[in-house]
Amino acid sequence: MIKPKVGRMFLATCVGSFFILILYFQNISKSASEQISGRDSFPVKSGRSPLQTLQENDQLEQSAVQATMQGRRELLEETCHTHTRKRRVLGPEDLRHLIVDDKHKLLYCYVPKVACTNWKRVMMVLTGDGRYREPLAIPANEAHIAGNLRSLSEYSTAEINKRLRTYLKFVFVREPFERLVSAYRNKFTRSYNTAFHKRYGTKIIQRHRADPQAEALEKGNDVSFEEFVYYLVDPQTQREEPFNEHWERVHSLCHPCLIHYDVVGKYETLAQDSRYILKLAGAEGEVKFPATSKSTRTTGDMAAKFFDNISPFYQKKLYNLYRMDFLLFNYSMPAYLKLR
Ligand SMILES: *[C@@H]1O[C@H](CO)[C@@H](O)[C@H](O)[C@H]1NC(C)=O
């Protein structure tokens, strides 16, 4: 998604302004009312950006959804404060997952396995100047073509800073192990995902299977969840290259301690949270977030089964690897883990 012109040089020269931005843009709406009114509606004035709408509404009596969102923001900020020692500076590389909608002033950080295909489709409708109307009419592979949507990393420093300051920034997260099992099932248990089998499966089998068959080494198409876990917790894996985005932590993909997200949506409340964002954007009439009814979706119960034959030692290592995602987004340690 990055254009070649954005390179290392750029990173060196824009350090100062990014730093200012981080200090300047501490979380908004600190003083907002804590009251929960039970209403689920709030005024949206025309001519306001979604960020202004959010800030103005948080000064008034809050609806239940607004209070929930404020709770998530505060918990995120506190956890960042407690768990991150040094504030790092953001570079364009860090902004690759942020998708820009200049028309509605939105920044969406996409996280694979958290309804990101549907959110990219919605972003294509929003930014498409009428080219698309119905998100589900856009083929999934088209939603993932770099170039159909703009990434924040493609903009100049000044343009980046302006957008980070004035646009509504949102991200969708999911229970980390449910997301991980979903990634495993999708990339390693479906026969059509040959690219992943070749790229990752062969390496995983070579390193983490005793006595592999020649065919398995060649195809990489029968990686077990256990082997996948060994691969993830092996320090060599991340020394070689960053995790693939499907199993990389939200903490590393979206930098929630450096970018102060205005809305943290959750997969568990996807429909409601998506509606809230589209309402803030004044885009309810333009697009509806697609309803999902997938029966193959990975659930918590399903995740529990996959962890059944992972030893407590590796469960602990894996939990530590994903710990920040658990803490930042208020997910408790799954009860099925044998760690206590
Ligand atoms: C965190 O999760 C707990 C348990 O699900 C919930 O009761 C609480 O309201 C959540 N806190 C925030 C700030 O979202």
Image: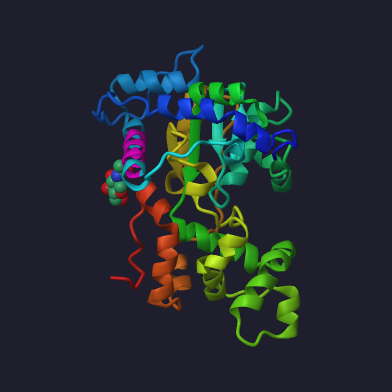
Residue 135 is a magenta residue = no
**Res. 329 visible in picture:** no
The way the protein has been coloured in the rendering is: rainbow
Q: Is residue 46 left or right of residue 77?
A: right
Residue 71 is a magenta residue = yes
Horizontal and vertical percent position of residue 269: 43, 44
Residue located 49% across and 27% down the image:
168
Residue located 46% across and 51% down the image:
174
Residue 95, by quadrant, is top right
Horizontal and vertical percent position of residue 330: 35, 49
Q: Quadrant of the N terminus?
A: top right
Above or below, comparing residue 211 to residue 190 in the picture:
below
- Which span of residues is magenta-colored? 69-79
Residue 74, by quadrant, is top left
Residue located 56% across and 52% down the image:
113
Decide whether the magenta segment is chiefly helix, strand or loop. Answer: helix
**Res. 257 visible in picture:** yes
Horizontal and vertical percent position of residue 329: 39, 47
Residue 185, by quadrant, is bottom right
